[in-house]
């Protein structure tokens, strides 16, 4: 069953992580880089940190290079229960990264507080940076209902999206 916009926002706020997808300009063909990310919803924006908690060789990550080339991205969040498919849901958010000039210090501070409040691992560390995204569109689906015409809402959402 297709989720309403409000249901999509509710699911995003409840999700503990998502997969951020960006386009990779280095490839001869269009390729998508997909990486799991922590994030927080701040008002009607998405904030995703580049942290120093998880081991990395560098904080100059491919997703940053990708977003410098093309600021559009997609965030996919989902919930799956293999024993109860009625509990399945997913939300796909089409995003555009805000430039540093578009992110005020007060908004950045609000994003920082939201991320630290959501993830205990971030409470005693500094972020390398925080990516802030505008949400351009949301689409979601839930297994708690189905279209009886033979086409489920997920396929209709794909066709409409």
Image (cartoon, rainbow, N blue to C red):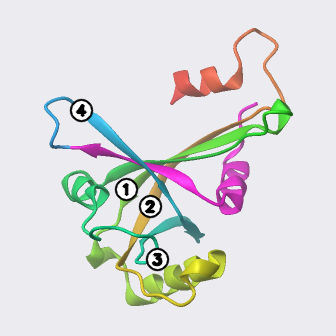
Foreground: disc 3 or disc 4: 3
Task: Measure the C-alpha gap from mark 2 to mark 3.
Answer: 25 Å
Query: Disc 4 marks which residue?
Result: 30
Question: Which badge, 2 or 3, comes first in the chain's sequence?
Answer: 3
Q: Which mark is residue 134?
A: 2
Q: Position of residue 78 (x, y in %)?
A: 65, 44
Question: Which badge, 3 or 1, comes first in the chain's sequence?
Answer: 3
Task: Measure the C-alpha gap from mark 1 to mark 2.
Answer: 5 Å
Query: Disc 1 marks which residue?
Result: 96
Q: From what the image shows, is residue 155 above or below residue 140?
A: above
Question: Which badge, 3 or 4, comes first in the chain's sequence?
Answer: 4
Quadrant of the image occupied by residue 114: bottom right
For label 2, the crowd category at 10 Å Cα-Cα, with few meaning under 14, some 14 to 19 and many 20 or more, is some
Q: Are marks 1 and 2 in contact (CB under 8 Å)?
A: yes
Asked if residue 17 lies left or right of residue 86, the reply is: left
Say what secondary structure mark 2 lies in.
strand
Which stretch is magenta? 1-24
Asked if residue 97 lies left or right of residue 42, the reply is: left
Q: Are marks 3 and 1 in contact (CB under 8 Å)?
A: no
Residue at the top extreme, as displayed: 150
Foreground: disc 2 or disc 3: 3
Foreground: disc 2 or disc 4: 4
Asked if residue 45 lies left or right of residue 152, the reply is: left
Asked if residue 25 lies left or right of residue 124, the reply is: left
Say what secondary structure mark 3 lies in.
loop
Q: Could one spot residue 114 in this view of the protein? A: no
Q: Position of residue 71 (x, y in %)?
A: 29, 55
Q: Could one spot residue 148 in this view of the protein? A: yes
Q: Position of residue 10 (x, y in %)?
A: 72, 57
31, 101: nearer the viewer: 31
């Amino acid at each position: 069953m297709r989720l309403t916009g409000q249901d999509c926002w509710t699911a995003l706020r409840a999700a503990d992580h998502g997969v951020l997808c960006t386009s990779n300009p280095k490839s001869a063909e269009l390729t998508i880089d997909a990486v799991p990310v922590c994030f927080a919803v701040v008002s009607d924006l998405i904030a995703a940190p580049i942290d120093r908690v998880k081991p990395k060789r560098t904080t100059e990550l491919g997703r940053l290079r990708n977003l410098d080339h093309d600021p559009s991205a997609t965030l996919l969040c989902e919930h799956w229960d293999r024993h109860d498919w009625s509990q399945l849901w997913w939300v796909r958010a089409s995003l555009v990264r805000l430039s540093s000039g578009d992110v005020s210090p007060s908004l950045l501070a609000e994003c920082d507080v939201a991320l630290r409040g959501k993830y205990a691992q971030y409470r005693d560390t500094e972020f390398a940076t925080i990516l802030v995204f505008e949400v351009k569109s949301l689409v979601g689906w839930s297994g708690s209902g189905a279209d009886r015409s033979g086409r489920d809402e997920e396929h209709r959402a794909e066709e409409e999206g």
